[in-house]
Image: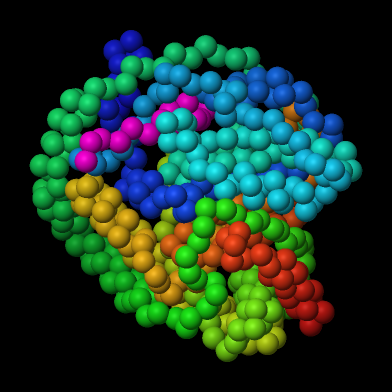
Amino acid sequence: MRGDPAQGYVSGVDDRLSPLDASFLHVEDAVSHMHIGSIAIFEGPAPRYEAFVAAVGAKLPGVPRYRQVVRRLPWDMGRPMWVDDPHFNIEYHVRHSALPAPGGDEELRRFVGRIMSQQLDRAKPLWEIWVVNGLEGDRWALVSKVHHCMVDGVSGTELLSLILDLTPDARVADLVAWEPRPAPSLVSLALQALGELALVPIRPAQSLRAAMRVPREALAQLGDVLGGLSSMLGVIRPGPTTSLNGPIGPHRRWAWATACVEDIKRVRAAHGGTFNDVVLACITAGFRDLLISRGESADRIVRTMVPVSVRQRDARGVAVGDGELSNKISVMFAELPVFKTDPVEMLADLTHQMEGLKDSHEAVAGEALTSIGGFAPPILLALGVRFASKGPQRSVNTVTTNVPGPQMPLYAMGRRMLQAFPFVPLGVQMRVTIAIFSYDGQVNFGVTGDYDTAGDLDVLCVGIEKALAGMLAAA
């Protein structure tokens, strides 16, 4: 539970990072930056910086994490916790910049690459927003960075709705006075962590007793988890050597591709599969073009990790926002058939494959594994995550994450958002990753690459757009 501000902290579950959230902190190092982000382009003119700062400040009561910092315990005796930042200054987090002439798309992409190459300061709340002037065509941009330990992609869309408005004439709320709560002492945190460590052997037994009260449901869930784990064992097998994996540096490149929601629906209606299957087929064709342009054989698969939201969904299948900014994701692993030459055949392969993955309950097993982390002593969890993320690996080549966004216009300070692109980090020796975000009839691909080894992201982006055009022509 939360404490009364006058009484200081009463540490509770909502103040602790979950095992999954904590893992994003433990994985981060000098070259693997674990912030996600978005790049939104608006019609002009840009708002005054001071007015925008005030508008963001008025929204902060809805996102308390944005005024909190991560506090780690000595020797990782317990999971890190969120505490109010006594030195919070919104002008540190809301920043102002401008593009060099001519202010085109290429200048914006280079600017984003430079911004995303810098780690967020762990001593501050883990977010930044950049107001970017100087875009040609009377436009301006908003570039945001948020550490992955704070949000996943789905809750990130909730954050976007807090910053943006549904109408151009929305009223800016008044600023609310805020006082940080006193931080807990290290002694009290250490004592609490020792108490939690003492409970580690007990919690699995408690969970087992609870499961035995409904044995039929427990057995069904166990079967799903075991089936998913069996399917995930194939990921352990190393794939063929490819330039998509290898050591990375701290600097980033960023590029984008665009598509239309209606075009993807037409392809789906003509050739089958889901919306996400069509998106993956386009990405598959893009990776094929990239490998061939590098002089590598395309007679292979490219294995991708596909994050899956495990948030509750309503009857329409839409993720239900619960107001929490923590991560609620699991993963599945798909094999992109870059050995095929026809995007329509790629789509058929992926449709069959993804149906099998859903039947295998990989996402259920992934969620179970992250839940098991809650029973592990935090120091062992921290060491395990760091060990798993180091060293050469060729089992997974890339990440492709697809986040559905609002299909209506959004506004910031009365200016309409024209386009929105996502940013997803690199890591674990993956040199190229892709995020997809849909907004107001658009499907936008944000492609992140290592600066030194992925200077040809445009080949991948052109390949994505060309593949959709080919499937449309075949339809």
Residue 73 magenta: yes
Residue drawn at x 62%, y 26% is 56
Residue 205 in the figure: left or right of residue 226:
left
Residue 235's place in the image compared with 458, above or below, is: below
Residue 413 x, y percent position in the rendering: 75, 28
Q: Residue at x 66, y 75 (%)?
A: 290
Residue closest to the eye, 298 or 161? 298
State whether residue 39 appears in this view.
yes
Inspect this view and state whether residue 151 appears.
no
Identify the image quadrant of the N terminus: top left
Of residues 409 and 37, which is closer to you in this image? Answer: 37
What colour-coding does the image apply?
A: rainbow
Left or right of residue 95, residue 368 in this image: left
Above or below, 361 against 294 in this view is above
Q: Which residues are magenta?
A: 62-75
Name the residue located 14 percent from the left edge and 47 percent from the top edge. Answer: 200
Q: Is residue 257 magenta?
A: no
